[in-house]
Image (spheres, grey):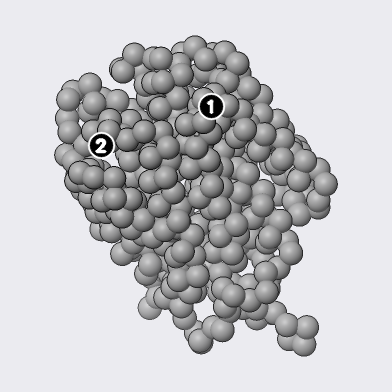
Amino acid sequence: MKTLIEEPVSTPVSENTEPEPTPDFNKTISRERIRIAVALFYFCQGLAFASWASRIPDIKSALNLSDAQLGTLLFALPLGQLLTMPLSGRLVTQYGSRGVLRIAAPLYALVLTFLALASTGWQLGLVLLAFGVVGNMCNIAVNTQGVAAEQLYGRSIMTSFHGAWSIAGFMGALIGLLLINLHIGTYLHFWIILIFVVINTVINEKFLVSHVVTEQRKTSFFTKPDGVLVQLGIIGFCSMATEGAMFDWSGVYFKDIVQAPSSMVVVGYASFMIMMAAGRFIGDWAIRRIGRRTLLQVSGCLIFVGMGIAVFFPTVVTASLGFMLVGLGVACVVPSVYSAAGRNSKISPGVALAMVSSVSYLGFLIGPPLIGYIAELASLRYSYAVIGLFGLMITTLISLTQVVKNGN
């Protein structure tokens, strides 16, 4: 007897063939328990990433890196993510997101611990590359799980999954702040996270949506990109460039521009993360009330205004307020993009998500190094002003296209 819900597998649709029916869901495990399990894997991935982000200023100081050097090294993480897109899509399609996630999740946290061992810039760059590779496998697998669970519910729940990721980011920032003030080293900090992730994987992987391979699928990552997926990817690009700026540079911004005390450096990052989490937990409700299209238009405006406040009024209070608006602005962009991509009728969810993520993650790839170079030439304030323009781009793209409509 099967005890797990089966994850639907989509196949490419040609002009002469009909799409295969989606497999039925087995009801042995309650959908609520499945939702909890999926959310916890989102949480663990966010916790691992936030733990790295909370320690960037310490690692930068320990390795005596300049802004430009750090920006160049940060390039390695999204590069690893981008290079792995074709492989991740194929693995998830062939072996199932559950099979990939139960291996990649603990491996992601294990690679995190090696970041603390880097003693030179090139070592940090090499480990960041590996961190990006494994992180991308987790990203595609967990978002495929989110799409499958959303199909089970028959309504939008994707933003709540990303909300779990954001809550983890906030918790990771608080844990980092606590351990820094307790003078606990980065290596021990990261090992605590690894232990937590392993425990979660052991307990909850059996409740994930199970992927049953019924036949060999021929969906290829290198299939001619669907126009809708490309547009979704561009919107995701703008959001992820903004997120990358906040994840990698908010601590440095508070330290160098806001000139916050060392104990307050993480406040900016925490402000951003808590509002991004809050926005994602109310995002599904907001989509039902005002529509996805309108919500995303407002989101772009919030990013622009929030960045403007942080740039023109760089104090602890005002910059924190600006970062909170930015967090609220980016909250629903990526979840909406991924939800739309995963429901594409022509391409399997894993490959569709990989295609959209390939374009979106260019934002992570370009954003952080760009900030470093602009900061080296002028100031970190100018860098954040440039990133703020991506908010206007999101609003413009949503307004000029019909890729996202006012529906659930």
Q: Quadrant of residue 183?
A: top left
Q: Residue at x 72, y 35 (%)?
A: 392
Position of 291 compared to 195: left or right? right
Q: Furthest residue to the front? A: 377
Type of residue at label 1? Ala
Residue at the spot of label 2: 63
Type of residue at label 2? Leu
Q: Which residue is drawn at 16% across and 39% down?
A: 188
Residue at the spot of label 1: 378
Q: Where is residue 28 in the image (x, y as percent from the top left)?
A: 43, 66
- The answer to which of 385 and 266 lies nearer the viewer is 385
Q: Position of residue 272 (x, y in %)?
A: 49, 28
- The answer to which of 283 and 269 lies nearer the viewer is 269
Badge 2 marks a residue whose secondary structure is loop
Above or below residue 44? Residue 142 is: below
Say the numbered circle drawn on residue 272.
Answer: none
Position of 34 compared to 185: left or right? right
Q: Which residue is drawn at 44% across and 32% down?
A: 249
Classed neighbour count for the residue bearing mark 1: other residues with Cα under 10 Å, few (<14), some (14–19), many (≥20): few
Q: Earlier in the sequence, mark 2 or mark 1?
A: 2
Disc 2 to disc 1, C-alpha distance = 23 Å
For residue 275, say whether it is visible.
no
